[in-house]
Amino acid sequence: MKRVVVGMSGGVDSSVAAYLLKEQGYEVIGMFMKNWHDDSVTISKECPWLEDSNDAMIVAQNLGIPFKAIDLSKEYKERIVDYMFDEYQKGRTPNPDVLCNREIKFDIFLKAAMRLKADFIATGHYCRKDTVEVNGIETHRLLAGKDNNKDQSYFLCQLTQQQLSKALFPIGELTKPEVREIAKEIGVVTADKKDSQGLCFVGKVRLPEFLQQKLEPKKGTVIEVPANGRIFENNPVDLALNGATSATLKSLSEAFHYSVDDGQKVGEHNGAHYYTIGQRKGLNIGGTPEPLFIIDTDTKENVIYTGQGENHPGLYRKGLFIAKEEMHWVRPDLALKVGDSKEYQVRIRYRQALETATLFMREDGLYIIFDRPQKAIAAGQFAVWYDGDELVGSGVIN
Protein backbone atom coordinates (compact mmCIF):
# COMPACT_ATOMS: atom_id res chain seq x y z
CA MET A 1 0.00 0.00 0.00
CA LYS A 2 1.40 3.39 -1.04
CA ARG A 3 1.78 5.93 1.77
CA VAL A 4 0.88 9.59 1.21
CA VAL A 5 1.21 12.56 3.58
CA VAL A 6 -1.47 15.19 3.02
CA GLY A 7 -0.77 18.82 3.86
CA MET A 8 -3.92 19.57 5.84
CA SER A 9 -4.56 23.29 6.27
CA GLY A 10 -7.83 22.98 8.16
CA GLY A 11 -9.77 23.97 5.04
CA VAL A 12 -12.32 22.03 3.02
CA ASP A 13 -10.04 21.36 0.03
CA SER A 14 -7.28 19.51 1.87
CA SER A 15 -9.90 17.72 4.00
CA VAL A 16 -11.58 16.29 0.91
CA ALA A 17 -8.18 15.53 -0.64
CA ALA A 18 -7.35 13.34 2.39
CA TYR A 19 -10.75 11.60 2.18
CA LEU A 20 -10.41 10.85 -1.55
CA LEU A 21 -6.94 9.37 -1.14
CA LYS A 22 -8.14 7.10 1.63
CA GLU A 23 -11.02 5.99 -0.58
CA GLN A 24 -8.53 5.22 -3.35
CA GLY A 25 -6.69 2.84 -1.06
CA TYR A 26 -3.69 4.90 0.02
CA GLU A 27 -2.30 4.82 3.54
CA VAL A 28 -2.95 8.45 4.47
CA ILE A 29 -1.25 10.60 7.12
CA GLY A 30 -2.48 14.16 7.75
CA MET A 31 0.08 16.82 8.57
CA PHE A 32 -0.50 20.47 9.54
CA MET A 33 2.24 23.04 8.92
CA LYS A 34 2.61 25.80 11.48
CA ASN A 35 4.39 28.57 9.64
CA TRP A 36 3.97 31.65 11.80
CA HIS A 37 3.93 32.50 15.50
CA ASP A 38 3.23 36.22 15.58
CA ASP A 39 -0.54 36.58 15.99
CA SER A 40 -0.28 40.37 16.34
CA VAL A 41 -0.36 40.81 12.56
CA THR A 42 -3.16 38.38 11.80
CA ILE A 43 -6.87 39.08 11.99
CA SER A 44 -7.66 36.49 14.64
CA LYS A 45 -11.32 36.05 13.72
CA GLU A 46 -10.52 35.47 10.06
CA CYS A 47 -8.07 32.58 10.00
CA PRO A 48 -6.06 31.93 13.16
CA TRP A 49 -3.63 29.06 12.79
CA LEU A 50 -4.76 27.45 16.05
CA GLU A 51 -8.34 27.11 14.85
CA ASP A 52 -7.10 25.75 11.53
CA SER A 53 -4.90 23.20 13.26
CA ASN A 54 -7.83 22.05 15.41
CA ASP A 55 -10.08 21.75 12.35
CA ALA A 56 -7.45 19.67 10.57
CA MET A 57 -7.06 17.42 13.61
CA ILE A 58 -10.84 16.88 13.92
CA VAL A 59 -11.10 15.98 10.22
CA ALA A 60 -8.20 13.52 10.54
CA GLN A 61 -9.88 11.90 13.56
CA ASN A 62 -13.17 11.59 11.69
CA LEU A 63 -11.39 10.04 8.71
CA GLY A 64 -9.51 7.67 11.00
CA ILE A 65 -6.06 8.73 9.80
CA PRO A 66 -2.97 9.62 11.85
CA PHE A 67 -2.38 13.36 12.33
CA LYS A 68 0.82 15.28 12.97
CA ALA A 69 1.72 18.96 13.26
CA ILE A 70 5.07 20.26 12.13
CA ASP A 71 6.54 23.65 13.09
CA LEU A 72 8.18 25.24 10.04
CA SER A 73 8.06 28.82 11.32
CA LYS A 74 11.86 29.19 11.40
CA GLU A 75 12.21 28.09 7.77
CA TYR A 76 9.17 30.13 6.75
CA LYS A 77 10.65 33.28 8.26
CA GLU A 78 14.03 32.73 6.60
CA ARG A 79 12.78 31.70 3.18
CA ILE A 80 9.52 33.61 2.77
CA VAL A 81 9.10 36.48 5.24
CA ASP A 82 12.66 37.82 5.03
CA TYR A 83 12.48 37.59 1.24
CA MET A 84 9.18 39.51 1.29
CA PHE A 85 10.66 42.30 3.38
CA ASP A 86 13.69 42.52 1.10
CA GLU A 87 11.58 42.64 -2.07
CA TYR A 88 9.17 45.30 -0.75
CA GLN A 89 12.16 47.34 0.42
CA LYS A 90 13.36 47.36 -3.20
CA GLY A 91 9.96 48.47 -4.47
CA ARG A 92 9.10 45.05 -5.87
CA THR A 93 5.99 42.93 -5.32
CA PRO A 94 6.78 39.33 -4.30
CA ASN A 95 4.35 36.42 -4.41
CA PRO A 96 4.73 34.56 -1.09
CA ASP A 97 2.32 31.77 -2.08
CA VAL A 98 4.43 30.72 -5.05
CA LEU A 99 7.51 30.78 -2.83
CA CYS A 100 5.73 28.87 -0.07
CA ASN A 101 5.02 26.01 -2.46
CA ARG A 102 8.57 25.95 -3.82
CA GLU A 103 10.42 26.47 -0.55
CA ILE A 104 8.13 25.03 2.15
CA LYS A 105 5.44 22.59 0.96
CA PHE A 106 7.45 20.93 -1.80
CA ASP A 107 10.83 21.15 -0.09
CA ILE A 108 10.86 21.19 3.74
CA PHE A 109 7.44 19.54 4.07
CA LEU A 110 8.25 17.02 1.31
CA LYS A 111 11.47 16.03 3.08
CA ALA A 112 9.58 15.62 6.38
CA ALA A 113 7.10 13.35 4.58
CA MET A 114 9.92 11.29 3.08
CA ARG A 115 11.29 10.76 6.61
CA LEU A 116 7.92 9.15 7.37
CA LYS A 117 8.63 6.74 4.48
CA ALA A 118 5.95 8.38 2.32
CA ASP A 119 5.72 7.63 -1.39
CA PHE A 120 3.94 10.91 -2.12
CA ILE A 121 2.71 14.15 -0.64
CA ALA A 122 -0.68 15.58 -1.52
CA THR A 123 -2.24 19.04 -1.29
CA GLY A 124 -5.70 20.52 -1.82
CA HIS A 125 -4.66 22.52 -4.89
CA TYR A 126 -7.04 22.81 -7.82
CA CYS A 127 -4.60 21.53 -10.42
CA ARG A 128 -3.73 18.24 -12.10
CA LYS A 129 -0.68 16.19 -12.98
CA ASP A 130 -0.11 13.54 -15.58
CA THR A 131 2.95 11.62 -16.69
CA VAL A 132 4.10 11.05 -20.26
CA GLU A 133 7.20 9.60 -21.87
CA VAL A 134 9.42 12.01 -23.79
CA ASN A 135 12.41 10.51 -25.61
CA GLY A 136 12.27 7.52 -23.27
CA ILE A 137 12.25 9.72 -20.15
CA GLU A 138 9.33 9.84 -17.69
CA THR A 139 8.08 13.43 -17.77
CA HIS A 140 5.50 15.01 -15.46
CA ARG A 141 3.08 17.61 -16.78
CA LEU A 142 1.51 20.23 -14.50
CA LEU A 143 -2.01 20.92 -15.74
CA ALA A 144 -4.65 23.50 -14.87
CA GLY A 145 -7.48 22.38 -12.58
CA LYS A 146 -10.81 21.46 -14.14
CA ASP A 147 -12.50 24.31 -12.22
CA ASN A 148 -11.57 27.41 -14.24
CA ASN A 149 -12.68 29.67 -11.39
CA LYS A 150 -10.36 27.97 -8.90
CA ASP A 151 -7.40 26.80 -11.01
CA GLN A 152 -4.31 27.13 -8.78
CA SER A 153 -1.61 25.82 -11.11
CA TYR A 154 -0.13 29.37 -11.10
CA PHE A 155 0.95 28.92 -7.48
CA LEU A 156 2.89 25.76 -8.40
CA CYS A 157 4.74 27.36 -11.31
CA GLN A 158 8.18 26.91 -9.71
CA LEU A 159 7.97 23.17 -9.10
CA THR A 160 10.60 20.85 -10.54
CA GLN A 161 10.22 17.47 -12.20
CA GLN A 162 11.56 15.85 -9.03
CA GLN A 163 8.98 17.64 -6.85
CA LEU A 164 6.16 16.80 -9.25
CA SER A 165 7.15 13.13 -9.24
CA LYS A 166 6.22 13.03 -5.53
CA ALA A 167 3.05 15.16 -5.78
CA LEU A 168 -0.62 14.20 -5.89
CA PHE A 169 -3.50 16.64 -6.45
CA PRO A 170 -6.66 14.65 -5.58
CA ILE A 171 -9.23 17.42 -6.17
CA GLY A 172 -7.85 18.69 -9.48
CA GLU A 173 -10.60 16.99 -11.48
CA LEU A 174 -13.34 18.53 -9.30
CA THR A 175 -15.01 21.92 -9.05
CA LYS A 176 -15.27 23.78 -5.76
CA PRO A 177 -19.02 23.13 -5.44
CA GLU A 178 -18.34 19.40 -5.98
CA VAL A 179 -15.68 19.46 -3.25
CA ARG A 180 -18.06 21.15 -0.80
CA GLU A 181 -20.77 18.61 -1.69
CA ILE A 182 -18.44 15.70 -0.92
CA ALA A 183 -17.47 17.37 2.37
CA LYS A 184 -21.14 17.68 3.36
CA GLU A 185 -21.88 14.08 2.40
CA ILE A 186 -19.12 12.74 4.65
CA GLY A 187 -19.88 15.19 7.47
CA VAL A 188 -16.59 17.11 7.39
CA VAL A 189 -16.61 20.03 9.88
CA THR A 190 -14.93 22.29 7.31
CA ALA A 191 -17.61 21.76 4.61
CA ASP A 192 -18.84 25.37 4.75
CA LYS A 193 -15.62 27.00 5.91
CA LYS A 194 -14.61 30.14 4.01
CA ASP A 195 -11.56 29.98 1.79
CA SER A 196 -8.42 31.42 3.34
CA GLN A 197 -7.41 34.74 1.78
CA GLY A 198 -4.09 35.26 3.53
CA LEU A 199 -0.50 34.16 3.32
CA CYS A 200 0.16 30.51 2.66
CA PHE A 201 -0.67 28.54 5.84
CA VAL A 202 -0.42 31.73 7.92
CA GLY A 203 -3.85 33.30 7.70
CA LYS A 204 -5.18 36.67 6.75
CA VAL A 205 -2.46 39.21 7.41
CA ARG A 206 -2.72 42.99 7.61
CA LEU A 207 0.02 43.61 5.06
CA PRO A 208 0.92 47.21 6.03
CA GLU A 209 1.29 46.24 9.71
CA PHE A 210 3.15 43.10 8.67
CA LEU A 211 5.62 45.12 6.61
CA GLN A 212 5.95 47.80 9.30
CA GLN A 213 7.56 45.24 11.60
CA LYS A 214 10.72 45.79 9.62
CA LEU A 215 10.05 48.57 7.09
CA GLU A 216 9.65 51.87 8.90
CA PRO A 217 6.89 54.28 7.83
CA LYS A 218 8.37 57.24 5.97
CA LYS A 219 6.38 60.22 4.72
CA GLY A 220 6.72 60.87 1.02
CA THR A 221 5.10 62.62 -1.93
CA VAL A 222 2.33 61.38 -4.22
CA ILE A 223 2.62 62.76 -7.76
CA GLU A 224 -0.19 62.64 -10.30
CA VAL A 225 1.00 62.25 -13.90
CA PRO A 226 -1.45 63.45 -16.59
CA ALA A 227 -2.50 60.92 -19.22
CA ASN A 228 -1.02 63.11 -21.95
CA GLY A 229 2.36 63.31 -20.24
CA ARG A 230 5.81 61.95 -20.94
CA ILE A 231 4.65 58.33 -20.92
CA PHE A 232 3.92 58.41 -24.67
CA GLU A 233 7.59 58.96 -25.42
CA ASN A 234 8.22 55.45 -24.17
CA ASN A 235 5.45 53.72 -26.14
CA PRO A 236 7.34 52.26 -29.09
CA VAL A 237 5.40 51.47 -32.23
CA ASP A 238 4.60 47.81 -32.77
CA LEU A 239 7.22 46.14 -34.94
CA ALA A 240 7.25 42.84 -36.76
CA LEU A 241 8.57 40.46 -34.12
CA ASN A 242 10.09 37.79 -36.35
CA GLY A 243 13.81 38.21 -35.93
CA ALA A 244 13.31 41.07 -33.49
CA THR A 245 16.58 42.47 -32.19
CA SER A 246 17.40 42.53 -28.49
CA ALA A 247 17.25 46.33 -28.61
CA THR A 248 13.68 46.21 -29.96
CA LEU A 249 12.64 43.62 -27.38
CA LYS A 250 14.24 45.67 -24.61
CA SER A 251 12.39 48.83 -25.62
CA LEU A 252 9.09 46.94 -25.70
CA SER A 253 9.56 45.32 -22.30
CA GLU A 254 11.20 48.00 -20.15
CA ALA A 255 9.22 49.59 -17.35
CA PHE A 256 8.96 53.36 -17.59
CA HIS A 257 10.06 55.48 -14.64
CA TYR A 258 9.02 59.03 -13.88
CA SER A 259 10.45 62.11 -12.22
CA VAL A 260 8.67 64.67 -10.05
CA ASP A 261 8.71 67.07 -13.02
CA ASP A 262 6.28 64.81 -14.91
CA GLY A 263 3.28 65.74 -12.77
CA GLN A 264 2.05 67.60 -9.72
CA LYS A 265 1.90 66.77 -6.03
CA VAL A 266 -1.55 65.62 -4.92
CA GLY A 267 -0.86 64.16 -1.49
CA GLU A 268 1.42 62.24 0.85
CA HIS A 269 1.97 58.57 1.66
CA ASN A 270 3.60 56.61 4.51
CA GLY A 271 6.28 54.80 2.53
CA ALA A 272 6.71 53.92 -1.16
CA HIS A 273 7.71 50.37 -0.20
CA TYR A 274 4.16 49.65 1.01
CA TYR A 275 2.63 50.12 -2.45
CA THR A 276 2.60 48.30 -5.76
CA ILE A 277 1.93 49.03 -9.43
CA GLY A 278 -1.78 49.07 -10.27
CA GLN A 279 -2.87 49.61 -6.66
CA ARG A 280 -5.91 51.85 -6.13
CA LYS A 281 -6.88 51.40 -2.49
CA GLY A 282 -4.84 52.73 0.40
CA LEU A 283 -3.85 56.11 -1.01
CA ASN A 284 -6.75 57.97 0.66
CA ILE A 285 -6.63 60.76 -1.88
CA GLY A 286 -9.96 61.93 -3.28
CA GLY A 287 -11.29 64.83 -5.30
CA THR A 288 -10.26 63.54 -8.73
CA PRO A 289 -12.83 62.82 -11.49
CA GLU A 290 -11.53 59.24 -11.71
CA PRO A 291 -9.74 57.13 -9.04
CA LEU A 292 -5.96 57.36 -8.83
CA PHE A 293 -3.95 54.25 -9.67
CA ILE A 294 -0.28 53.76 -8.89
CA ILE A 295 1.78 53.69 -12.09
CA ASP A 296 5.30 53.78 -10.60
CA THR A 297 7.07 53.74 -7.24
CA ASP A 298 10.52 55.09 -6.40
CA THR A 299 11.67 53.61 -3.09
CA LYS A 300 15.01 55.45 -3.18
CA GLU A 301 13.43 58.88 -3.40
CA ASN A 302 10.26 57.67 -1.61
CA VAL A 303 7.90 59.00 -4.30
CA ILE A 304 4.71 57.40 -5.64
CA TYR A 305 3.49 58.23 -9.14
CA THR A 306 -0.22 57.94 -9.94
CA GLY A 307 -2.53 58.37 -12.89
CA GLN A 308 -6.29 58.89 -13.13
CA GLY A 309 -8.48 55.99 -14.23
CA GLU A 310 -7.78 52.38 -15.09
CA ASN A 311 -7.13 53.31 -18.72
CA HIS A 312 -4.23 55.63 -17.92
CA PRO A 313 -1.44 54.70 -20.37
CA GLY A 314 1.09 54.59 -17.53
CA LEU A 315 -0.59 51.41 -16.26
CA TYR A 316 0.13 49.49 -19.46
CA ARG A 317 3.16 47.77 -20.97
CA LYS A 318 3.61 45.72 -24.10
CA GLY A 319 6.13 43.29 -22.65
CA LEU A 320 8.33 42.19 -19.78
CA PHE A 321 11.78 40.71 -19.17
CA ILE A 322 12.92 37.74 -17.07
CA ALA A 323 16.63 37.50 -16.26
CA LYS A 324 18.37 34.23 -17.13
CA GLU A 325 18.84 33.25 -13.48
CA GLU A 326 15.13 33.82 -12.72
CA MET A 327 13.77 31.54 -15.46
CA HIS A 328 12.27 28.17 -14.56
CA TRP A 329 11.01 25.48 -16.90
CA VAL A 330 8.63 22.98 -15.31
CA ARG A 331 9.25 21.11 -18.56
CA PRO A 332 13.04 21.38 -19.10
CA ASP A 333 12.71 19.47 -22.37
CA LEU A 334 10.67 22.39 -23.78
CA ALA A 335 13.11 25.14 -22.69
CA LEU A 336 13.81 27.64 -25.46
CA LYS A 337 17.37 27.98 -26.71
CA VAL A 338 19.01 31.35 -27.37
CA GLY A 339 17.55 32.74 -30.58
CA ASP A 340 14.33 30.74 -30.30
CA SER A 341 10.86 32.23 -30.06
CA LYS A 342 7.47 30.62 -29.42
CA GLU A 343 3.90 31.68 -28.82
CA TYR A 344 2.33 30.77 -25.47
CA GLN A 345 -0.60 31.78 -23.30
CA VAL A 346 0.72 33.90 -20.42
CA ARG A 347 -0.56 35.33 -17.15
CA ILE A 348 1.24 37.80 -14.90
CA ARG A 349 -0.83 37.29 -11.75
CA TYR A 350 -3.13 34.70 -10.23
CA ARG A 351 -6.62 34.60 -11.76
CA GLN A 352 -5.71 36.91 -14.60
CA ALA A 353 -7.16 35.71 -17.90
CA LEU A 354 -4.55 34.07 -20.11
CA GLU A 355 -3.12 36.39 -22.76
CA THR A 356 -1.40 35.47 -26.02
CA ALA A 357 2.28 36.41 -26.07
CA THR A 358 5.49 35.50 -27.86
CA LEU A 359 8.50 34.39 -25.81
CA PHE A 360 11.94 35.34 -27.15
CA MET A 361 15.03 33.71 -25.66
CA ARG A 362 18.13 35.90 -25.83
CA GLU A 363 21.58 35.78 -24.22
CA ASP A 364 20.55 37.95 -21.27
CA GLY A 365 17.24 36.22 -20.60
CA LEU A 366 13.65 35.85 -21.73
CA TYR A 367 11.52 38.58 -23.29
CA ILE A 368 7.74 38.17 -23.25
CA ILE A 369 5.92 40.41 -25.74
CA PHE A 370 2.12 40.42 -25.55
CA ASP A 371 -0.27 40.72 -28.47
CA ARG A 372 -1.95 43.54 -26.55
CA PRO A 373 -0.60 45.78 -23.76
CA GLN A 374 -0.96 44.42 -20.23
CA LYS A 375 -2.11 46.32 -17.17
CA ALA A 376 -0.06 46.65 -13.97
CA ILE A 377 2.96 44.47 -14.73
CA ALA A 378 4.77 44.43 -11.37
CA ALA A 379 8.42 43.58 -10.83
CA GLY A 380 8.83 40.68 -8.41
CA GLN A 381 5.66 38.90 -9.50
CA PHE A 382 5.74 35.68 -11.53
CA ALA A 383 4.96 35.47 -15.21
CA VAL A 384 3.71 31.99 -16.11
CA TRP A 385 3.28 30.49 -19.58
CA TYR A 386 0.93 27.72 -20.71
CA ASP A 387 0.53 25.49 -23.76
CA GLY A 388 -3.17 24.67 -23.62
CA ASP A 389 -3.84 23.28 -20.13
CA GLU A 390 -0.18 22.63 -19.40
CA LEU A 391 1.95 25.02 -17.34
CA VAL A 392 5.31 24.93 -19.11
CA GLY A 393 7.42 27.48 -17.26
CA SER A 394 7.65 30.64 -15.18
CA GLY A 395 9.95 33.40 -14.05
CA VAL A 396 10.25 36.46 -11.84
CA ILE A 397 9.41 39.69 -13.66
CA ASN A 398 12.38 42.05 -13.74
Image (spheres, grey):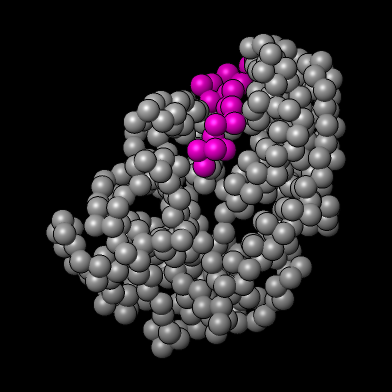
Q: In x, y percent, where is residue 66?
A: 82, 23
Q: Is residue 171 left or right of residue 19?
A: left
Quadrant containing the C terminus in the rendered view: bottom left
Q: Residue, x 72% and y 33% (percent of image)? A: 113
Residue 377 locus on image (x, y percent): 42, 60
Residue 385 placement, left or right of 71: left
Image point 63% across, 12% down: which residue? 24
Residue at 70% x, 72% y is 215
| Residue 4 lies within the magenta run | no
Is residue 248 depicted above or below 373 in this figure? Answer: below
Quadrant of image for the N terminus:
top right
- Name the residue located 30 percent from the left edge and 52 percent from the top edge: 337
Nearest the eye: 292 or 220: 220
**Location of residue 6 by image quarter:** top right
Look at the image and say whether residue 162 sits in the magenta stretch: yes
Magenta stretch: give its range.
160-183
**At which x and y percent is residue 213?**
76, 68
Return the x and y of residue 62 as percentages of the image width and height: 82, 17
Quadrant in the picture for residue 63: top right
